[in-house]
Amino acid sequence: MTMFDQGTQNKPANLWKSTYQPALLEERLDNNVVRCHLSPRKCTLKPGQLGFCGVRGNVEGRLVTFNYGKGVHNTEETIETEAVNHFAPGERILSCGNIGCMMNCSYCHNWATSQAKYVTDKDVYYYTPEQVVDTALRHGIRVISWTYNDPVVWLEFVRDTSRLARQHGLINLYKSAFYITPEGVEELLPSMDIFSISVKSMDPEYYRRHTKGRLEPVLEATKLVYQAGKHVEISNLMITDLSDDEESARKIVDWQLRELGPEVPLHYVRFHPDYKMRNTVRTPIPRLERAREIALEMGAEHVYLGNVYDTPWSNTFCRGCGAELVTRYGLNAQLVGIDERGHCRHCGRNAHFRLLSPAEQRPSVAELPEGHDVRSFNWHGDVRSLHVQVRNTAAVTTRAFYRRRRSSVAEPWLVLTLQPGESYRFILAKAATDEVGPEVALPPGVESNLHEVFDRAHFPTVSVEESGISTTDVSPLPHFRTQLKLLEDCE
């Protein structure tokens, strides 16, 4: 625990700390001490103290949360972004992430927002539950994803917004390392439909050393949501020379088969160097492929490689007849061999999919209207996704346009309608081998920033307009040591 500086609310870098809301799962003790029952740490806090997460604390003897409605920019992505392959493949989602975390993984891809002490006001956006739901509905998005740093410490806002979303017929997805108590799980179960859970390792010492958490509560919480009948998928980040060996692959499959079931999709995910673990290289793909072979040999039915392009092992194949059921390239999916029940069309075997009715598509135009500023971006190295942020500064509703550039065909321009003052962020991921890169067309009054994305779990906070196009495809900006020096210089 740390003491929070209530006087920092007038400092530019800490405005987000200036307001708070009552927190759930509070235990009141003597002498104005409170205990938080959200994370398995169960932090005991004196007045003026913050918990490990940096966003929950004790104010005058009551447990409060400093991040209600505060997070990174909401972003339209696809459901595969969240290591979810068996629920509505290719579905567009609205990804929502907050600030703070109940863990501190040495390799965190989102450290600039997950570790509260590094958060600056420029990365913080403010939302109400109604605004989040309205954004999804206006843009034809049917799934809200709670993701990025980790949604556990955003419990109050997630609970309120997901329940409102449910009332409007929306689906809720929870992407998490799931270091949470059973009491916290109970708060989520009424409104969550999908759980994508990152089990970092089956080694308790790994958890203690590299995540600052514990393994057993993660496994117990995962079993609770599976037993509740929720759609569950498991991912395992395989870190180079640390957790990418065959024994690590076997242990997670053994646990899954014993405690969950063979039908639960399992994702072995490629690592990129980041945060405090940059003195290494990306996970060698043959090690991920071997992990997949082991899992299938042991009896897991659906095993995938994540953060890997140009591989057939992101596709879904029937475990009965071997037919290809879903093809995927990057974060883009196409149903080719499953029926409306989620079964193989060739042999009828259950492939364990949950499908939605066909989604509404964005309108498109063949020709771009005159008077637009066109900006292009080329894919390079491991940068094969882009977050595009556009903001309508005009007082009237307007339209921006975007499309993919391919070497063989000219694709139509997709239409993005923006309300007055609206800021909208969406992902474009490489969808074909001959795709050169995307381009965005902006009418007068619309501003844009582009953010390179190395992997699906990474939330970039530095735009190419600030940093330039990356010259290394190893670790995205900001770099931890450099950012830390900048923050220290500002103090």
Image: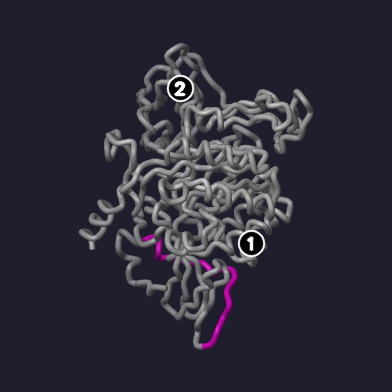
**Which label's residue is closer to the chain start, 1 or 2?**
1
Residue pictured at 61% horizontal, 26% vertical:
334
Residue pictured at 23% horizontal, 56% vertical:
485
Give the residue furthest to the right. Answer: 348
Give the residue furthest to the top. Answer: 408
Left or right for 370, reference 217? left
Q: Nearer the viewer, residue 325 or 172?
A: 325
Residue 94 in view (yes/no): no
Numbered disc 1: secondary structure: helix
Q: Nearer the viewer, residue 88 or 5?
A: 88
| Residue on which disc 1 sits | 220
Q: Amino acid at mark 1?
A: Glu
378 part of magenta stretch: no
Q: Nearer the viewer, residue 235 or 471?
A: 235
Residue pictured at 47% horizontal, 44% vertical:
457
Count up the numbered dots. Answer: 2
Q: Which mark is residue 471?
A: none
Numbered disc 2: secondary structure: strand
Give the residue furthest to the bottom. Answer: 31
21 part of magenta stretch: yes
Residue pictured at 36% horizontal, 62% vertical:
117
Task: From the top left corner, tell me how far across and down residue 335 is, in percent.
Answer: 65, 26
The magenta region covers: 15-30
Q: Quadrant of the C terminus?
A: bottom left
In space, the residues marked 1 and 2 are separated at their CA atoms by: 43 Å
Q: Nearer the viewer, residue 205 or 97?
A: 205
Q: Amino acid at mark 2?
A: Arg
| Residue on which disc 2 sits | 404
